[in-house]
Each structure stands twice: as C-alpha cells, then as structure tokens.
Image (cartoon, helix red, strand yellow):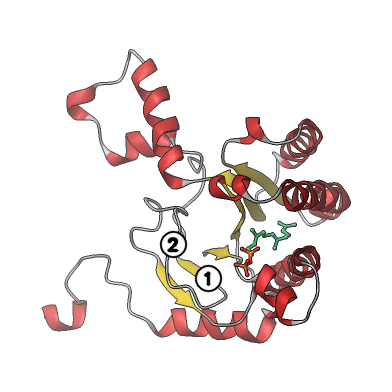
Amino acid sequence: MHVAFIMDGNGRWAQARGLPRHEGHRRGAAVVKKILRVVEKNGIKYATFFAFSSENFSRPESEINFLMNLFEKFLKKYNKTFCEKEVRFRAIGDLSQLPINLQLAIEKLIQNTACFDKFHLTIALNYGARSEVIYAMRNLLKNKNVDVDNLTWEDFEQYLYTKDLPDPDLIIRTSGEQRLSNFLLLQSAYAELYFTKTYWPDFDEKEFLLAIEDYGIRERRMGKINDKTNN
Ligand code: FPP
C-alpha cells in the first residue's frame, strides 16, 4: 500500500496558539516521525510526504530558510534509523533549486538506502505536478529512441520523478482544504482521497488509522464494472 500525505495547516495551528509559524513546522516534523512509526507498525510499504511545493518558494525568506534547515536536520538525524529499519529514501521534485547542504544530505541518504526494499519513504521537495510533466517531456523528447506513435502510459511514467514508485492508493490531506494542489496529479488518477479538518501538527495515529479504515471500506473499481453487478 502507498499512502501519500499533504501536510497542511502548520501555520494556522501555530497562529491559533499565538505562536510563530515555524513552531507549527517544528511540531509538524515531530508528527512525520510519529506517523512513520505507525507506517512501520502497520506494514505500509510506501509513504510519501508533500513537504514543500514549488509554490512555497514565494513564502518569506525566513520561513523558507527555517524549513530547509528543518528538512536537512531531519534527514541527517534519521540516516542511521532508516538504515537499521531498511527504509529506502527518495526525494521527488526539482532538487537543484534547494540549498546545497540539503541537496548533499538528500544525495547521501538516497545512496545509503538504495539497497533497501522493506519500506519506501519519499519526500516531495520543491515539487509540482505540472513541472514534473515538463521535466518528463523534456527528457522524453531528448530520447531519440522513443517510438512516439506507440508511446504508452507505461513508457511515459518512466520519465516522471516517481518512476520507481507504485501509484498512491490513498492520499490524506489535513487542515480542511479539499484539493490536491498540484501534488501527484497523474499518479493519483485512481487514488482514494481522505480529507480531515485536523491541522497537520495535531494529526495522530488514531486519525491515520481512521483514514486507513475508511479507505478499506471504499470500493476501488478503477473505472471497471463492479464484479458483483456483472454476474
Ligand atoms: C503546510 O502548512 C506545510 C508546509 C508548507 C511544510 C511542511 C513541513 C513540515 C510538516 C515539516 C517537516 C517535514 C519533514 C518531512 C521533516 P502551511 O504552512 O501551509 O500551513 P497554513 O496553510 O496553515 O499556513
């Protein structure tokens, strides 16, 4: 199973408590850690977190710097744990625009965990689905061996950032917004969507399990006719 998270509401969580926005992000990082434990406990093989969108670069510099530092510290801190627990780490998005120290930490973690297959943790950083399509198209058009007339989705998806990942089965978005905001738009073609009003810093195991339970009872027909009515 692949669960993807749109972690929203850190700023509003902090504002509601009279705290600076970065306190919401700090607490948000602690929630990622807690959720990863639930992922492990429940044997969920793939987890993806939308940590920074391409659009987030238009936020004040101080908030961007805080977040970039937070990501770097997080990745360095869990390097050892990921190796112990056999977590393969990936980052999706235009990483070339990120601070060099963060790029290096990402590269190191990707290399250190490349041999693992028990769990797959992916962080979307400077990610946007439309930019991903442009990235894919550029690389596809550069490949002179592409048989354009017989191109299939399976061929095309090899050019996406997510080329080695299965499509998400469930996308959870916190904070009450009911949209995908340019996150995994093509990959989520058949994903179930779960929206909760809870702000990300308050998201917890109980609510995560509720979302999984809700996913379990929803019927995923993938555009086909229900087997039961097709007898
Ligand atoms: C959205 O809340 C959240 C972000 C832009 C950053 C997400 C980052 C974290 C949860 C921190 C840690 C993550 C990792 C992977 C270590 P918002 O700021 O848009 O909140 P608002 O909509 O209430 O303003």
For label 1, the crowd category at 10 Å Cα-Cα, with few meaning under 14, some 14 to 19 and many 20 or more, is many
In percent of width and height, residue 186 lies at 37, 50
Dividing the picture into quadrants, the one containing residue 25 is: bottom right
Q: Residues within 10 Å of mark 2 (few under 14, many from 20)?
A: some
Image vertical order of residue 82 relative to residue 43, above or below? above
- Asked if marks 1 and 2 touch (Cβ < 8 Å), the reply is yes
Q: Does residue 91 appear to the left or right of 37 in the view shown? A: left
Q: Amino acid at mark 1?
A: Arg
Which residue position holds label 1?
173
Q: Between 23 and 187, which is closer to the camera in this rendering?
A: 23
- The residue lying at 51 percent from left, 84 percent from top is 213
Marks 1/2: CA–CA distance: 8 Å
Q: Is residue 15 visible?
A: yes
Q: Position of residue 59 (x, y in %)?
A: 64, 51
- Position of residue 155 relative to residue 219, above or below, is above
Q: Quadrant of ligand 1?
A: bottom right
Q: Mark 1 or mark 2: which comes first in sequence?
A: 1
Q: Is residue 91 above or below residue 108?
A: below
Q: Residue furthest left?
A: 231
The amino acid pointed to by label 2 is: Leu
Q: Which numbered dot is residue 180?
A: 2
Q: Secondary structure at mark 2?
A: loop
